[in-house]
Amino acid sequence: MLKIGEAAAKSGLPVKTIRYYDDIGLLTPTVERSESGYRLFLPQVIDRLVFIKRAQSLGLSLEEVKEILAVHDRGSLPCDTVKGQIQDKIAQITVQIEQLTTLRSELQTVLSQWQEPAPELIETTICPNLEVKRSF
């Protein structure tokens, strides 16, 4: 059994993070409590912590990681679940890229049409370069 400090050292994660993961149920099958209430971890916790860290680095949320671990804890390989989540993540990123490309284009248009405003406009406008021309 490993103490939390040992699990932290071996996984490269802070003790506080490991406590949090335990509190939200990500480490359930690999953690026990001593008679005095200290967390004691099975050696398998290291693989689990490394998996969680890698999944997060790929953009998966802790809720998504929890789903994956639940499949694993029921005795199945969660590769289909992981694949589906990665496909969803790619679709989300594709939409974000499209939105950012549109935003970049709009910003470039604003800059290309930029004009230095006359100081007397302070009474009637905030920044004329950003204002949308309205027709009433």
Image (cartoon, grey):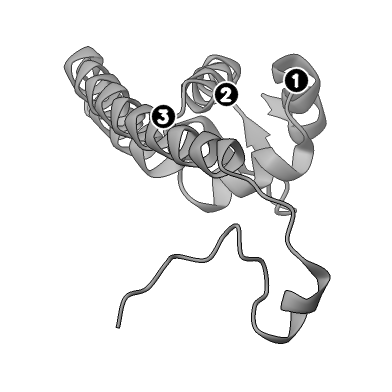
Q: Amino acid at mark 1?
A: Gly
Please, is residue 29 above or below residue 53 in the view? below
Residue under label 1: 12
Q: Residue 67: x percent and y percent?
A: 29, 36
Mark nearer the N terminus (3 vs 1): 1
Q: Residues within 10 Å of mark 3 (few under 14, many from 20)?
A: few
Quarter of the view holding residue 32? top right
| Crowding at mark 1 (Cα within 10 Å: few <14, some 14-19, many 20+) | few
- At mark 1, the secondary structure is loop
For the N terminus, the image quarter is: top right
**Tag 2: Cα neighbours inside 10 Å, few (<14), some, or many (≥20)?**
some
In this figure, which residue is indicated by the disc labeled 3? 101
Q: Amino acid at mark 2?
A: Lys
Quarter holding the C terminus is bottom left
Give the alpha-carbon distance from disc 3 to disc 2, as whole Å.
30 Å
Which of the two marks, 3 or 2, is nearer to us in this view?
3
Residue 51 pos. (x, y %): 50, 18
Give how far across and how far down residue 134 sits, in percent.
Answer: 37, 73
Residue sitting at 47 percent across and 20 percent down? 58
Q: Which mark is residue 128?
A: none
From the viewer's perspective, is 27 left or right of 92? Answer: right
Task: List x then y, in percent, for residue 85.
Answer: 26, 26
Q: Residue tagged by mark 2?
A: 53
Nearest-to-viewer mark from 3 and 1? 3
Residue drawn at (60%, 57%) of the image: 129
Cα separation between marks 2 and 1: 9 Å
For the residues bearing labels 2 and 1, Cβ distance under 8 angstroms: yes
Determine the image quadrant of residue 97: top left
Residue drawn at x 62%, y 48% is: 20
The answer to the question of whether label 3 and label 1 lie on touching residues, with beta carbons closer than 8 A, is no
